Amino acid sequence: MFTHTHALQYEAKPDGPDAAFARRMQEILGGQWGEMTVATQYLLQGWNCRLPGKYKDMLLAIGTEELAHVEMIVTMIDRLLDHQPLKPDAADRSKEAAAGFGTTNPQHAIVNGGGAYYRDSMGLPWSGGYVTASGNLMADFHYNATAEMMGRLQVARLYNMTDDPGVKEMFKFLIARDHMHQMQWLAAIEELKADGLEGIPVPEAFPLEEEPADYGYAFIDASDGPDAAAGRWASGPAGDGRGTFSARPIEATADAPILPPGDPRLFGTPQSDTKNLLQKAKDLLT
Amino acid sequence: MFTHTHALQYEAKPDGPDAAFARRMQEILGGQWGEMTVATQYLLQGWNCRLPGKYKDMLLAIGTEELAHVEMIVTMIDRLLDHQPLKPDAADRSKEAAAGFGTTNPQHAIVNGGGAYYRDSMGLPWSGGYVTASGNLMADFHYNATAEMMGRLQVARLYNMTDDPGVKEMFKFLIARDHMHQMQWLAAIEELKADGLEGIPVPEAFPLEEEPADYGYAFIDASDGPDAAAGRWASGPAGDGRGTFSARPIEATADAPILPPGDPRLFGTPQSDTKNLLQKAKDLLT
Amino acid sequence: MFTHTHALQYEAKPDGPDAAFARRMQEILGGQWGEMTVATQYLLQGWNCRLPGKYKDMLLAIGTEELAHVEMIVTMIDRLLDHQPLKPDAADRSKEAAAGFGTTNPQHAIVNGGGAYYRDSMGLPWSGGYVTASGNLMADFHYNATAEMMGRLQVARLYNMTDDPGVKEMFKFLIARDHMHQMQWLAAIEELKADGLEGIPVPEAFPLEEEPADYGYAFIDASDGPDAAAGRWASGPAGDGRGTFSARPIEATADAPILPPGDPRLFGTPQSDTKNLLQKAKDLLT
Amino acid sequence: MFTHTHALQYEAKPDGPDAAFARRMQEILGGQWGEMTVATQYLLQGWNCRLPGKYKDMLLAIGTEELAHVEMIVTMIDRLLDHQPLKPDAADRSKEAAAGFGTTNPQHAIVNGGGAYYRDSMGLPWSGGYVTASGNLMADFHYNATAEMMGRLQVARLYNMTDDPGVKEMFKFLIARDHMHQMQWLAAIEELKADGLEGIPVPEAFPLEEEPADYGYAFIDASDGPDAAAGRWASGPAGDGRGTFSARPIEATADAPILPPGDPRLFGTPQSDTKNLLQKAKDLLT
Amino acid sequence: MFTHTHALQYEAKPDGPDAAFARRMQEILGGQWGEMTVATQYLLQGWNCRLPGKYKDMLLAIGTEELAHVEMIVTMIDRLLDHQPLKPDAADRSKEAAAGFGTTNPQHAIVNGGGAYYRDSMGLPWSGGYVTASGNLMADFHYNATAEMMGRLQVARLYNMTDDPGVKEMFKFLIARDHMHQMQWLAAIEELKADGLEGIPVPEAFPLEEEPADYGYAFIDASDGPDAAAGRWASGPAGDGRGTFSARPIEATADAPILPPGDPRLFGTPQSDTKNLLQKAKDLLT
Amino acid sequence: MFTHTHALQYEAKPDGPDAAFARRMQEILGGQWGEMTVATQYLLQGWNCRLPGKYKDMLLAIGTEELAHVEMIVTMIDRLLDHQPLKPDAADRSKEAAAGFGTTNPQHAIVNGGGAYYRDSMGLPWSGGYVTASGNLMADFHYNATAEMMGRLQVARLYNMTDDPGVKEMFKFLIARDHMHQMQWLAAIEELKADGLEGIPVPEAFPLEEEPADYGYAFIDASDGPDAAAGRWASGPAGDGRGTFSARPIEATADAPILPPGDPRLFGTPQSDTKNLLQKAKDLLT
């Protein structure tokens, strides 16, 4: 259960409106790697977590913090949308104005009346499919670490696309939090191993002896790039401590498949009804 | 440029048809973490890679191998779909038949005529949005490691949902390759660091001194789970070697935002046209 | 900014597992009219609201409550998924088991490992496009009232699809809250009018005198159902207090449109490049 | 069954081409609240309606009229797309031309060859998911009233984004029809009540005595906005005539949930197989 | 502009309810190749058609007929949904009932209250992206012919999935219309050629002499299937009457691409900022 | 199984960067009719093909070639994205720069860091739903011919939207291949007929005598365009050699449908529970 305060976790106030940049900022609100994703994902992983204690508690703590970031970005976009130009401005002859108008999002005006929404910078709605909660914490924490890397990367890029000091100030905060959260998930990965809960390869409990022996440690090369096997992934001890990397070209081990004819009630080509085919052949001959 | 052989990298032949399981197997063909995703993702990361040499070559090598896995899974699904029941079978009184019919995918028959397609186990089409190629190899390799964990996890679960020896045999192969590929990406992450190309936090080149000092190493707790700060993510040295984790409750640092009235041409509530509002008020009074 | 407690707003505990019903319950979590929609929608309307005071405050209050309902439904689905059958159970010969297995969602096991996700009962991911925040509170509040009607309707239907007392107990709570929230939005609509902020038709500020006179109060009948004009919408005073309903058959007032030929650089049929056409005609003649 | 005339219900002729505005107009053709939605929605509600007579007849009458609006908007967009610039025009040095080119939709040329399509102003395809037909007319009519409010709002906004007299003329017609249709649905809501078919809360037939008593009339406040309970929704008689609004802060009534361990065959964290966990612990110690 | 009659073009009455088959029938209502697609596609092609006369008139005639088919299929689905089972029926012990319950669409009950909607048999909403109107009639008519083939194929398959005489009767009508419409589009393709409006290859107006000579008539073989060049597509005169088919293996003609380093402001790997890289190397050495 | 070479099938090198055109080119990479579609579609049709020999071999040969085209287009887009402007460039005062900035895709920078992705020119992700493999080769080959027509049409349009010689050079290659592939599929259609595998109408095996006699050869006119029946589709021998085209106006043959009341447990309007309705009526009277 949640409670909310109107005060913000961090200031979200631009020095001036900029509808074109508001459109770009939608990426970190409603894009695949935006704040909606991490907020709803950490909460879902926490609620679904079947292991009581520190991991579950931590997931719900950070998920709740991310909701505050959603709020801050919405607020920033709202303020950037003040005075969004509705038509090319005949009075402002600057090239910047022309460029800016061209790159604004018309839905900000037509649909939202000057407000943010849960879509990315190209107008694609945020999707519940962006959220992953596999039930396996090791897999999920790797995903979470990735999400924070993608998030920090995108904010750092946006940082270089604006000169507005107020926007940059908020971006610094988000960059710092994504910095922390990357380290947090990497620490949690180590802790999962130390606690004996899960290891590499995921899932650790699937018995390695079931794997066909030649395929668990071999780098298989299917392209002619000369350096593909020049990395650590193709020689030396493997990361699970139980085997050694090797390398070899790809090769086929099974014959070309031949499928049986289809069910005649599905009208494919050919049908299994060979009498029908023979009849057709006869018809053609006569 | 590619060339293709009809022979398969590994055998893909079930012991018998099973349309219900064919539907489940769609998840690892056309689902978010299925083979379509990793094949097209590694190829795209390789093509987009602006660093010639081992990383680019390796990406294109593994992406090409994954295309062979797409082919094997399509072939397996096709064979499982032989004799798909079109109606509840009046002759077969077994409960298994009833359960099986209920869980088949009708599109396998109506749309495909007894063949696989690029959708997941609930019929959602595979999406190009599943593919990530950020341009930053450290972020991408963490994503790739995650993808192999999710992939191995899903195949291992499917392994427990069938008794067909032929299907299980192919699953063992896929599980072994996902085992290798997890270790491959984790090795590549270490190599990126060793080569001095990228570190933690991603992107490493964003200057840490720009981050507001209090936020880069603090676990911020927004929930009342008692153990949220009981992990390594809340105390001790941070993973970037430059700071120490701490923990504190969430707190607001900025006032509740107040947005200005909207553009009257957008007809929001309220409009900035205060005269209009006053006039309305007057009308109500008289 | 939010804080979270692990305690639930209301109990979410079924009397026993039921994976088939867990799939059905996804509709009110990740469906168009599910709790994800109302929670994120009310919050967005509140954050975007440019009118400080009671409406904004109320929107953020109810949006925050709805987050607690998301949490309860996730928890209920998780518990219904305990012991989800992975194969048709050879030991249980009951028809209910067969029917149940057929209607479960395989992604609950394969993708989530026994947990809820943000998708509807047919596996379609929740979409940010479900959320409406138009900036006009009168339009939005009508949408909100609709959402609560659809929500209560769906929970009431689900109530008739289960016999589990624990599930039914939580549904009664949700039905009561949707009851309250319907009345809340209808009261807020009246309050908007009383406050002189907005009226009917929305947007009220668009000058009625701009509308072509014959079209603002006429029911236009384009079908041969005999009773189409037998309701209040076709006679008597209109709801805006400024006109009288009338009825008439549909009729065309403008000629059939004729479009000019297309740009020859777009290779449509026909191109505007008539010389080209003439040349073709000539070629055919010779 | 339908018949069609080439003549238009109302003129749809701009004074000149404007590809940038053609892109904006896609919103009211293929957007969530565009004419495709209301046309196909009213027809579906009419076809599905299980109550013969005036409501069903009226739904089919208005749905058929909306098809004529789809046709008019397609025609208008087609004409606005005449002479769509394919490259930045070196001859036209005006800033308007630059701004205009930037904001056009490239698919209008590349995909459609100078024609409209069923997508919104950001290129998102129209979705059958936009259409609601719940079977409950009270809920549906509230949705229909909302749709006409959103529609009129969007056209009124577009009206302020163009100076073309021909476009504005058609917009006035659409604004007038949306005016009429708002009043129509509000009148139909009253008629449903007067006919004793449905009331508030929807569905009326669910017995109110099943609702837990404290939750059907209470405004529950989960945020610190001081005026959240200052509206009619928090005190005074409720709209169903059977209770009185009250207000109170949100509070938890159920303990934090604890989920049992997951099925070991799904490889979650942790598995229920505790022996396995103990063995792992032992392995770590030795 | 359209008018509507409540009478149906053809009877749409099943002999009895069958909720499981109702779900299957959604494919030809809201699936990619269903009636919604052809109705809205032919209308759009007709409205967008810039060539007045027989083609435009024919497109609008057939598009309007297809609307009547949408209506018939909706009506049929509605009737099949009478008495949809809400729970596994304890009284009916038949296996058919179990199988049937498992394969019904729960949204038919929960969302629609016993009615059809614009989604396919797996619950995916119909998409405006299914509709193609390229502006080139030759390309579009090939697509239309395809659509009628896919449509007839799917109805013929469904015909084999039911024993209900009423359903089969309507399917025969749809199969006959799809038969006619296939021939109609193929005839229209010939007429386009005869009228000199468009030929093969589409678009005919692009000058063939611009094509690199070796590539316009060569079958290029990239796989080892021995019979790939054993068809008419690899030898003999080509269909445009201007060249002769040949066959050869695929071969590369351009060097492996090398991309320049990325913009350092985008933080890719590597950045173009080589000084930065050198500094990192130095840091590692000291 | 595939192998890959880094060398390209054809050169993919622009004369200079052009981020605005890079966005337009996404259409032929990740759009409905782009190279991703044909590559994955021909491969899927080949894998699913249940007829060994020339058709299956040819499908896999061309599908593999199309993968090389995906690679070329990705490479071209990558090079066009060099030096993508991140802000309106204050130094470059040209109108072209302004227009260009406005029409770039911000995700190319924010999400991809200067690389291509699998989305279309409006940012919509490529969908597995674009791929059709019906199991009936005649239907599929018509679709394939259409795809090559749409593909050549779009590249020819793009050819007229750029002046870059390097881009135009690659487009000529693609146009030539689409030329060949159109003829290839049309030849394969003839070969299917000659081989007696399938004819018109598709599916040929459905017995024509089952069709209601009046509907298989009649052009039915539902619109008032005067020339709708002036084409070959309305008179003369039909294309299947078994009937003669005729024409007539549309007419209804079945009564307006009346649906029974709904299940009261679904709370529709009206419910079948008439006692309930009577009680309500009584309540209103007293």
Image (spheres, coloured by chain):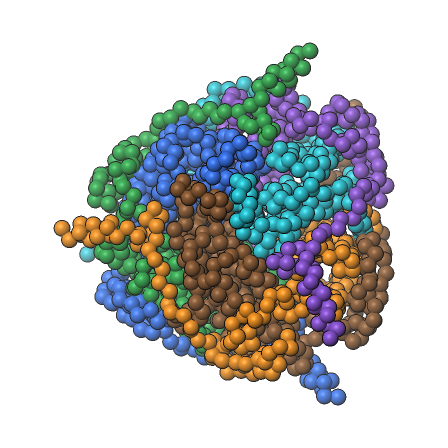
Chain colours: A green, B blue, C brown, D orange, E cyan, F purple
Q: Quadrant of the C terminus of chain A?
A: top right
* Residue E107 drawn at (x, y percent): 58, 52
* Residue F262 drawn at (x, y percent): 66, 55
| Left or right of A226, for residue E157 | right
Tell me if I can see residue C215 in this picture.
no
Question: For residue F96, which quarter of the picture?
Answer: bottom right
Question: For residue D38, which quarter of the picture?
Answer: bottom right
Q: Depth check: A94 or F274 in front?
A: F274
Tell me if I can see residue B85 in this picture.
yes
Q: Depth check: D20 or F218 in front?
A: F218
Q: Residue at x 27, y 59 (%)?
A: A187
| Left or right of A126, for residue E81 | right
Judged from this view, the residue extending furthest toward the bottom is: B286
Answer above or below: position of E268 versus E59. below
Judged from this view, the residue extending furthest toward the top is: A286
| Left or right of A15, for residue A150 | left
* Residue E224 drawn at (x, y percent): 45, 23
Question: For residue E32, which quarter of the picture?
Answer: top right
Q: Residue at x 38, y 76 (%)?
A: B251
Q: Quadrant of the N terminus of chain A?
A: bottom left
Answer above or below: position of E191 versus B152. above
* Residue A273 drawn at (x, y percent): 58, 22
Answer above or below: position of F262 versus F133. below
Q: Residue at x 61, y 46 (%)?
A: E19
Judged from this view, the residue extending furthest toward the front is: E91
